[in-house]
Amino acid sequence: MIGANGCSTPANSEAFPIKRFSLSAALLCSLVGPAWVQQGHGTDAPARVNTFKPAKVEATATRLAALKAPAGFKVTILARDLQNLRMLVVAPNGNIYASRREQGDVLLLKDANEDGVLDQLPQAVAHRPGVHGLAINADQLYMATATEVFRAPIRPDGTLGVVERIINDLPDGGQHPNRALAFGPDGMLYISVGSSCNACNETNPEPHIIAKGRVVGTYQQTDAPLK
């Protein structure tokens, strides 16, 4: 029989000594019961969350001098007050592209003679809400938001041509909406997709993967996602 606590009791008490069985059943329920209760998706409950964010400090000459660099290298400031930069990629000609997720744009930084001084003020060359991941391949700049990937041809002056969306169905980001992009030696485009939460039962099998696909005209996923 099934008792009210969800544990079995014997139909024939003569086959099982009552005291021994009662003790064993109690121990079993104490071990199994809580684990069983914790299964499923749980319930919503309000909670207080405290987030610690280190204070931002100015990049002074003293702090720069404390940074360690390999022999033959030194750390200098190329640009200031760019606010919330996220990802950087460098084109073959040395142009630098930087994404700013909160501003929703991509900046172009140019230092053609590599003297450590920008040739011009940073220039916004693309605007997409939540843009984060960047990659360059075949003279095209690839840009990722939480659920989409765009690309645009890079003009000789570093600005971009018409921005084209090639992916529009990446899993929703949830708590981890930042996507990173990279092209592998195999010519494939790799896209990171983090889990939608920190501590939950993930219902969507697509998050926490690395999507892999070939870009020929449009993006085509060629293999099962890499775990």
Image (cartoon, helix red, strand yellow):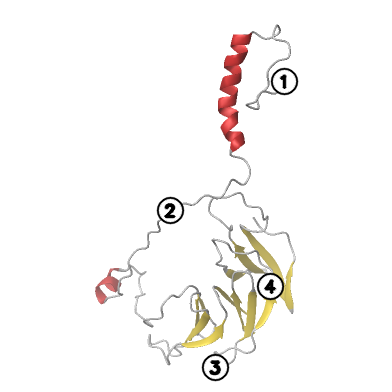
Q: Identify which residue is drawn at 60% across, 87% down.
A: 154
For the residue pair 213 and 125, the one nearer the viewer reads as: 125
The amino acid pointed to by label 3 is Asp
Q: How far apart, in angstroms, are the residues tagged by discs 1 and 2?
A: 43 Å
The amino acid pointed to by label 1 is Met
Q: Is residue 138 visible?
A: no
- Residue sticking out furthest to the top: 14
Residue 157: assigned label: 3
For the residue pair 42 and 160, the one nearer the viewer reads as: 42
- Give the residue number, with chain letter if any, for mark 1: 1
The amino acid pointed to by label 2 is Arg
- Give the residue number, with chain letter if any, for mark 2: 48
Q: Identify which residue is drawn at 37% across, 81% down.
A: 81
Look at discs 1 and 3 and give the one toward the viewer. 1
Q: How far apart, in angstroms, are the residues tagged by discs 3 and 2?
A: 50 Å
Rendered image quadrant of residue 180:
bottom right
Rendered image quadrant of residue 165:
bottom right
What percent of the width, then of the height, locates residue 63? Answer: 28, 71
Left or right? Give the position of 166 relative to 68: right
- Give the residue number, with chain letter if any, for mark 4: 168
What percent of the width, then of the height, locates residue 83? Answer: 41, 78
Label 1 close to label 2 by CB (< 8 Å): no
Q: How far apart, in angstroms, are the residues tagged by discs 3 and 4?
A: 29 Å
Mark 3 / mark 4, whichever is N-terminal: 3
